[in-house]
Image (cartoon, rainbow, N blue to C red):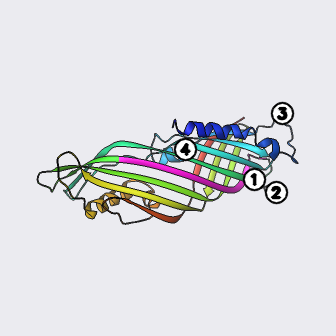
């Protein structure tokens, strides 16, 4: 999060500079009282992935029917553990971390919306980056003696697409932002590794990693969509391109 703070502050500072030129040719109903800013909390990763995922965002209106927004925050996958085929005991993660940031530019429909931005139906381009990593201690039970191993995973996702959403402004201050459609082109980089810990001897086998992959797919909502490939290797990474969707629920305060 500390690494993201300068980026977020830089984007926030730009929001007070860019509108000067962007507003040329436009007129607000009351430039003194017109509320052009929204700060908000993206609750989607908090509900879907982990209670530690706190993602905050800021939207700035640059004309009566246009705005841009930036988001940044912590991002990690939920805990998982399992016993598999009496040969594999996966303990809880010992190390989980990650981060995300995203941005979009919004065009609010002038003829469709009764009010000006940031209220109403909108569309616009967006981009996002997600990184998360985790480590799990694993017992290989059918080895003699039993071998302790470390399973590690890293996921990077870069996405770009077009979104469609609706923002409700209630009593001029409360914001409920719903992005219900966001087709995108995404690049996935997924790395899985499995190795012995300490003095144990263990030769990683695709069978073990594939079994762990199946557990992740069953335990974690949306994991299969995060990693397009259904096959894994004993170590190393795979990069793939794919199509994605964006569903976001955010609540905020307008000022």
Distance from the alpha carbon under mark 2 to that under mark 4: 30 Å
On screen, residue 154 above or below 56: below
From the viewer's perspective, is 184 left or right of 29?
left
- Residue 215 percent coordinates (x, y): 33, 57
Q: Which mark is residue 57?
A: none
First-in-chain label (1 vs 4): 4
- Residue 134 percent coordinates (x, y): 37, 47
Q: Which mark is residue 108?
A: 1
Q: Quadrant of residue 180?
A: bottom right
First-in-chain label (3 vs 1): 3
Under circle 3, the secondary element is: loop
* Label 3 with label 1: CB-CB less than 8 Å: no
First-in-chain label (3 vs 4): 3
Residue nearer the viewer, 101 or 195: 195
Residue 60 belongs to magenta span: no
Image quarter where the C terminus lies is: top right
Q: Quadrant of residue 173?
A: top right
* Label 3 with label 4: CB-CB less than 8 Å: no
Region in magenta: 116-134
Under circle 2, the secondary element is: loop
Question: Alpha-carbon neighbours of circle 1 within 10 Å: few (<14), some, or many (≥20)?
Answer: many
- Residue 41 percent coordinates (x, y): 59, 40
Question: Alpha-carbon neighbours of circle 4 within 10 Å: few (<14), some, or many (≥20)?
Answer: some
Looking at the rendered image, the disc whose residue lies closer to the viewer, 2 or 1, is: 1
Distance from the alpha carbon under mark 2 to that under mark 3: 25 Å
* Residue labelled with disc 3: 32
* Label 2 with label 3: CB-CB less than 8 Å: no
């Amino acid at each position: 999060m500390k690494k993201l703070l300068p980026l977020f502050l830089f984007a926030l500072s730009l929001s007070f500079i860019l509108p000067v030129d962007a507003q040329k040719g436009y007129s607000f109903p009351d430039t003194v009282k017109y509320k052009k800013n929204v700060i908000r909390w993206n609750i989607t990763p908090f509900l879907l992935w982990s209670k530690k995922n706190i993602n905050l965002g800021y939207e700035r209106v640059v004309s009566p029917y246009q705005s841009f927004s930036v988001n940044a925050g912590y991002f990690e996958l939920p805990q998982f553990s399992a016993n598999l085929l009496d040969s594999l005991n996966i303990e809880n993660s010992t190390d989980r971390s990650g981060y995300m940031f995203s941005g979009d530019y919004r065009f609010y429909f002038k003829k469709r919306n009764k009010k000006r931005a940031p209220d109403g139906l909108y569309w616009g381009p967006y981009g996002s980056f997600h990184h998360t990593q985790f480590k799990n201690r694993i017992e290989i039970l059918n080895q003699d003696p039993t071998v302790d191993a470390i399973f590690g995973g890293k996921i990077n996702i870069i996405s770009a697409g077009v979104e469609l959403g609706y923002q409700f402004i209630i009593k001029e201050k409360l914001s409920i932002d719903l992005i219900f459609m966001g087709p995108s082109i995404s690049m996935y980089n997924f790395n899985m590794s499995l190795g012995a810990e300490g003095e144990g001897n263990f030769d990683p086998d695709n069978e073990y990693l594939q079994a762990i992959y199946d557990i992740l797919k069953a335990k974690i909502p949306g994991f299969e969509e995060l990693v397009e490939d259904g096959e894994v290797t004993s170590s190393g990474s795979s990069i793939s391109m794919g199509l994605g969707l964006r569903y976001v629920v955010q609540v905020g305060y307008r000022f």
